Amino acid sequence: MKNIKLITDGSCDLSQQIIEESQVEIVDVMVSFGDKSYSTRTDITISQFYDMMKDFNELPKTSCPSPNQFIEAFNCQEDNIIVLCLTSKLSGIYNSAVLAKKMYEEEFGNKKRVEIIDSTTGCIGQGLLVSQVGRMINDNKDMDEILKKIDELKNELVFYGALHTLENAIKGGRINPIAGRIANVLNLKGIVHVTDGLVKPIDKARGEKNSINKVVDYIKNNIDKCSGKILAVGHANCPEKALKVKEILEQTYNFEEIHIMEVGPSMGVYTAEGAILAAVL
């Protein structure tokens, strides 16, 4: 019998296949439009979130799971627990989980071994890490072996994306409004690299086709840094773009698994609708 439970947070974007195979428990995050808050897993769908965001003048806000939400997840049959969190450089989720561990141990002592892991990534990259941890648990690897492997996998992950619009970056004050709108008029798409726990702008492309090609090129130029066995393609309410990226990369690489994932509210707040992401592990 497996004696390790895997937990992640609601910022992690996953395919249904990974959820079922890894048996991961997801601690939910909330998204707020003004004074109305919604569970990102039960109250609104991802497509509804993007529709609501179009009509909202400000950026919606996401909130971290409380320590009590994590503690509830700790109340399980397993004696060993791994919590894989969104990068601590972009969110307080990791700190909330660490606090939950402290509170749990103060009440119950060392009844269980709880390990809180900063994934140093998020979204579909975090989803790929969940898939690999779940596989190791299913293969009956022990805790120390899994924890050591997670550290290796975090450094191997290759993760790039293209933003269709800079509107949310403008709303969030990340880009000067005039410069951002000029970029939108010129049909410039921002290319980003998710690395070292941060989302870093690295390039730009004119037009949708060029932006997709640039993401593919960045993946191809860096895929030798990892095993290159699993591909995840994430899309912010634009599945046709995800299928295009999948088709292009499939022509060059023989992946063991390919996952198409919807980019949920936690990352979608910043990417806006139309973003395309690709990650390989």
Image (cartoon, grey):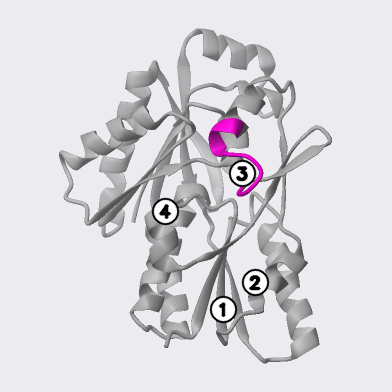
Disc number lying in front (1 or 4): 4
Q: Callout 3, which amino acid?
A: Ser
* Residue 167 against residue 160 in the figure, above or below: above
Q: What residue type is labelled 1?
A: Ile
Residue tagged by mark 2?
73
Tag 1 secondary structure? strand
Q: Nearer the viewer, residue 236 or 199?
A: 236
Three-letter code, disc 4: Gln
Q: Is mark 3 on a helix, strand or loop?
A: helix
Residue 142 or residue 47, whichever sits in front: 47
- Residue denoted by label 4: 16
- Circle 2/circle 3 CB separation < 8 Å: no
The crowding category of the residue bearing disc 1, from other C-alpha atoms within 10 Å (few below 14, some 14 to 19, many at least 20), is many
Q: How crowded is mark 4: few (under 14 residues within 10 Å), some or many (20 or more)?
A: few
Which mark, residue 81? 1
Cα separation, mark 4 vs mark 3, equals: 18 Å
Mark 2 or 3: in front is 2
**SS type, badge 2:** helix
Q: Do the residues labelled 2 and 4 touch (CB within 8 Å)?
A: no
Q: Which of the two labelled residues, at mark 2 and mark 4, occupies the earlier sequence position?
A: 4
Residue 62 placement (x, y as % from top left): 70, 44
- Residue at 39 percent across and 15 percent down: it is 207
Question: In this rendering, is residue 226 above or below 174?
Answer: below
> Which residue, given by chain and number where applicable, does mark 3 sit on?
266
What span is colored magenta in the figure?
41-48
Label 3 Cα neighbours within 10 Å, binned few <14 / some 14-19 / many ≥20 = many
Tag 2: residue type?
A: Ala
